[in-house]
Amino acid sequence: MKQRFLGRSGLRVSELCLGAMTFGQDTDEASAHRILDVFTEAGGTFVDTADVYHRGVSEEIVGRWLKGRRRDDLVVATKVFGTMGEAPNAGGLSRKHIVSAVEASLRRLGTEYVDLYQTHVWDATTPVEETLSTLDTLVTSGKVRYLGASNLSASQLQRAQDVAGRNGWERYVSLQPLYNLLAREVEWELVPVSLAEGVGIIPWSPLQGGWLTGKYRRGMTAAAPGTREARYQEELGREAWRERDNDETWRVVEALVAVAEEAERTPAQVALRWLLGRPGVTAPIIGARTVEQLTDNLGAVGWDLTPDQTVRLDEASARPLPYPYDVLHRFRDREPQD
């Protein structure tokens, strides 16, 4: 597995990141440790978790696996924001919560530092200066090596970078957005801002909860019981299937399956390979629940789509642009007038 620089930082990470969100719920500890073993044996070095994943259990599982391993060989990322209790300051991005949260994450992970510490979502109730100055102190203290963000709008990301830059604080080097063949809205503004600011993109849900694995086909009427999609429907109390059961989705899925058959790869491998080739993307986050799923996902590296296959996937997954992006797109290649 290749190593890539995370944005314009000097941090090298594997081109696939292993997400640990399923650890402690869908994946028991023994299976999680086996997944981590297989991932690192394949050259993976980048592992992502969060303090709220099953109320810290995911971090604890990763932490127990880390014992006895060469810590400097790995890039461990976690996140802060989520509420970890009922106390008034048990969540958000205030100085009080961040300082408490990082200490708790370090204990659960059993490590002296976090390589990449990420704000999980924007906190509209806390001044961004308070959040960023606190994060800066974590870097200068050695408890955190690099800073990242997740689930921001383009204006929020730009604001954070500008505030940090003006004050000489550490800036975000990475962004975790939703990005895949069925969700390309980040390309409208977040990708351009990330490229301009030197922020590496590490997409979450690169397979859109299983929709890009080839297991769903036109004509089906519901997800199979026990699948992530079935749980999603149950949790939200609505038939999420109907939100995806449309011509746009099936056009993407059918193009993906066709390219996969042509390339003699699985649909999941093709979907990940396409994402690996997008501008600004450093490492998609794969959330394998089993070793078998992980092994399939690892087949996304070491080869390339042909230009024609890439174009076909691009065209199948393109969406009509709303204003003002439609106007900007039409004029993006306009030659300057003399």
Image: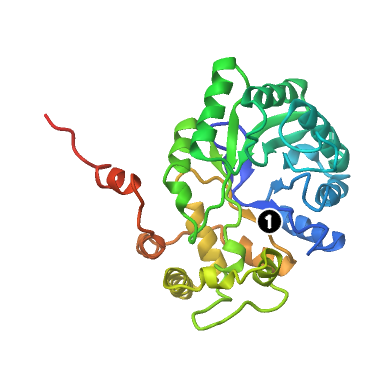
Asked if residue 265 shows in the view, the reply is: no
Q: Nearer the viewer, residue 126 or 118?
A: 126
The answer to whether residue 143 is above or below residue 49 is above
Q: Give the crowd class for mark 1: few <14, some 14-19, many >=20 residues within 10 Å.
A: few
Number of marks in the rendered image: 1
Q: Amino acid at mark 1?
A: Ala
Q: Nearer the viewer, residue 1 or 100?
A: 100
Circle 1 — which element? Answer: loop
The percent coordinates of residue 269 (x first, y second) are 55, 65
Residue identified by numbered label 1: 42
The percent coordinates of residue 281 (x first, y second) are 51, 46
Q: Quadrant of residue 316?
A: bottom left
Q: Quadrant of residue 248?
A: bottom left
Q: Nearer the viewer, residue 307 or 25?
A: 25
Q: Could you tell me which quadrant the C terminus lies in? A: top left
The percent coordinates of residue 192 (x first, y second) are 43, 39
Please identify the residue farthest to the bottom as the structure is shown.
219
Q: Nearer the viewer, residue 80 or 24?
A: 80
> Could you tell me which residue is drawn at 83 percent across and 44 percent down?
69
Please identify the residue farthest to the left as the structure is shown.
338
The answer to whether residue 131 is above or below residue 239 is above
Please identify the residue farthest to the top as the structure is shown.
167
The answer to whether residue 334 is above or below residue 288 is above
Whether residue 186 sits left or right of residue 128 in the image: it is: left
The percent coordinates of residue 164 (x first, y second) are 58, 22
> Could you tell me which residue is drawn at 56 percent across and 81 percent down?
221
